[in-house]
Image (cartoon, helix red, strand yellow):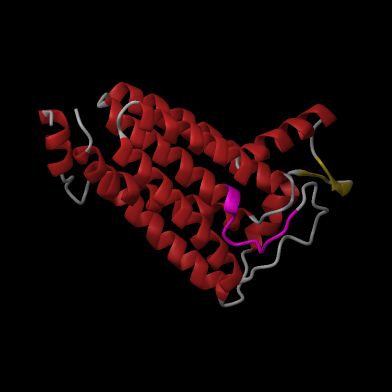
Amino acid sequence: MSEPVHALSRASAPWWQPRVLAPVAAALAFVALAAFIASGHSFAFDTRLVLLFRDPANPAVPIGPTWFQEAVRDMTALGSFVGLFFMATTATLALWLCGYRHLAVGLVASLLAAVLVSSGLKIAIGRERPDIVAHTALTFTASFPSGHAFLSALTLLSIAGFVGLASRRDDIKRLCIVLAWVMIVLIGLSRIYLGVHWPTDVIGGWCLGIAWSSVAVTWFGRRMAASDPA
């Protein structure tokens, strides 16, 4: 085992560092949002932000030309089960073939658990989808948290973190995180644009994804990396 991996597995950041505070704050924000929404309360800005993406003269029509609307639907598809499945499969196989088999298994286990949790939360909270505009994408489940927002944040940030652990290079990790966040933000905004989620659904999904992926990478991933050969 190389020294960088050993040192990485032992490292623990002080609690005041952003990489510790950010996931803790995200977890607390998600719990607060979930409790508020589950109690039947709503946020006035949810409606305002949904309508912001709609033609004032006809709320059934999203703003922008037809090609842009189609591009947004393509973007939202990246956060679907199918889109994320292929991303996760590619990352898992790459880690496995490069000899990081514990990391590959850890990534799969974390993502499968998240899918179950996402479905359970939707059933338990049972928030209705936005009804103030026409949906321009099909929906099959409850609204909170946004599965696209939660699972895209979890999957992409976990992949970035696990690839960073495998490469042991900060520049590669930073590049993966930047690209992940670009996709995460665009996928989340696409759900609001299409009228299928309230903004707080997306915010809640992002918060849960940040918290979950941070634990998966920092606690679970580093232990998996320490078990893999150098």
Q: Residue 144's x, y, as percent?
A: 59, 62
Magenta run includes residue 230: no
Q: Is residue 63 above or below residue 119?
A: above
In front of the other: 172 or 130: 172
Residue at point 89% right, 47% down? 58
Q: Relative to residue 56, is residue 226 drawn left or right?
A: left
Counting every numbered tag in the picture gives: 0
Q: Is residue 123 above or below residue 19?
A: below
* Residue 163, quarter of the rendered image: top left
* Residue 19, quarter of the rendered image: top left
Magenta run includes residue 140: yes
Residue that lies at the very extreme toward the bottom in this rendered image: 39
* Residue numbers of the magenta segment: 139-148
Dominant SS of magenta comes to: loop
Which corner quadrant holds the N terminus? top left
Q: Residue 94's x, y, as percent?
A: 41, 28
Could you tell me if residue 185 is visible in this image?
Answer: no
Residue that lies at the very extreme toward the right in this rendered image: 57
Residue at point 56% right, 35% down? 86
Q: Relative to residue 201, is residue 130 drawn left or right?
A: right
Q: Residue 69's x, y, as percent?
A: 78, 34
Residue at point 23% right, 36% down? 228
Q: Residue 172's x, y, as percent?
A: 34, 23
Could you tell me if residue 127 is visible in this image?
Answer: yes
In front of the other: 146 or 80: 80
Residue at point 61% right, 46% down? 81
Which corner quadrant holds the C terminus? top left
